[in-house]
Amino acid sequence: MSAPRRRRAEDVAGLGKARATLFAAPGLLLIGLFLLFPAIWTVYLGMTDYRLTGFAAANPHFVGFENFSTALNDPRFWNSLWLTLVFVLISGIIGQTVLGFSLAWMLRNVRGWVKTSVETLVLAAWVIPASVASFLWLALLDRRNGTLNALAGTDGYAWLIQHPMECIIIFNIWVGTAFSMQLFSSAISAVPPSQLESARMVGANTWQQLRDVILPNIKGHLLTNTLLITLWTFNTFTPYLLTAGGPNGATDILSVYIYQTAIPGGQLGLGAAISLIMLVINLVIALMYTRAAGAGKKRKKVRS
């Protein structure tokens, strides 16, 4: 008797093609409705002169790549991109990553109410709604009755006007550090204790343990954290709640620039084109991190 035919790998659940299609249909419908359709619609808008009001709103015309050319030749776009890169580098890659790792490292051996209190305070900034966090910072930095002026004795000093970029950078670090802290805490706790003990036995100090044991073991977590923080910070809109892109465009990062172009400015087609340029930049960033991760794995295999 011949052996029973092996079930095809693509139908391990035994549902059959028709039932499997019905089973996946709701998920595919949601993906198409909330991801695929908006993406196609954005591409379409980016190639038209669509506006929110006026004749172009009722009868938009296809303009091809004119919007993309307009954006790339606009000095305001390049200034916005530069501000975004500075914002991402300082508040995300450096600020959140370094502070998050520092907190995780300092709390690695702390127990009891001290660790719970620190983690609660850091997580609170992350989980509260952006509107509430922004209101708290507006109350802190207000030039008339702000808490910071009251504590520093600088009554009437306009922090959001005198130092707008610094304010949104510190604000973003405060909001987003919790994610890095939690990720690095888990990564550090997963490092084999035997490796740390071996390092101590040969006389390695704290810095040497960090450099030679901890960092090599958490390289993957470090790369993942940096990628996610970079993309989240690059696309965040929260600073608009503090400064609305001002004063005089000093905090006009890309997400704010797109909003001001498309909604108050009414140029929905141009705004969609800039959004697509922003999407391409995001894809390039993700590809760079993926390449870096792949190169790291190859080097690890070669060494082993």
Image (cartoon, rainbow, N blue to C red):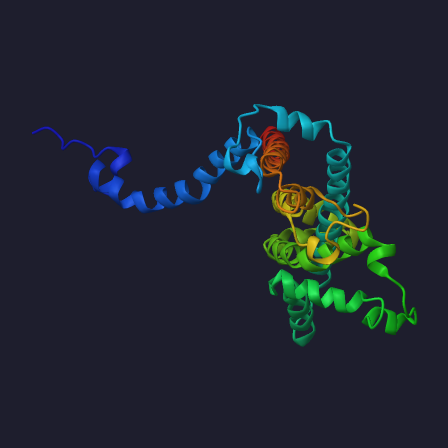
Assign the C terminus to one quadrant of the image. Answer: top right
Measured as percent of width and height from the top left, residue 118 is found at 69, 69
280 or 215: nearer the eye?
280
On the rendered image, what quadrant is the N terminus found in?
A: top left
- List x then y, in percent, for residue 80: 74, 39
Vertical comparison of 247 with 300: above or below? below
Q: Nearer the viewer, residue 267 or 100?
A: 267
Is residue 166 left or right of 37 when viewed as pictured? right
Q: Position of residue 49 (x, y in %)?
A: 58, 31
* Residue that lies at the very extreme toward the left in this rendered image: 1
Q: Residue at x 70, y 28 (%)?
A: 72
Q: Residue 100 at x, y = what percent?
A: 70, 56
| Residue under the image location 14 percent in, 33 percent down | 4
Is residue 261 rendered to the left or right of residue 142? left
Q: Quadrant of residue 280?
A: top right
Q: Quadrant of residue 200?
A: bottom right
Is the residue 251 above or below the residue 51 in the image?
Answer: below
View extreme (bottom): residue: 113
Q: Nearer the viewer, residue 218 or 45?
A: 45
Is 224 situated left or right of 95 in this image? left
> From where the camera sits, is residue 172 visible?
yes
- Residue 201 at least partly seen: no
Is 64 situated above or below 18? above
Residue at coordinates 20% horizontally, 33% vertically from top-left? 6
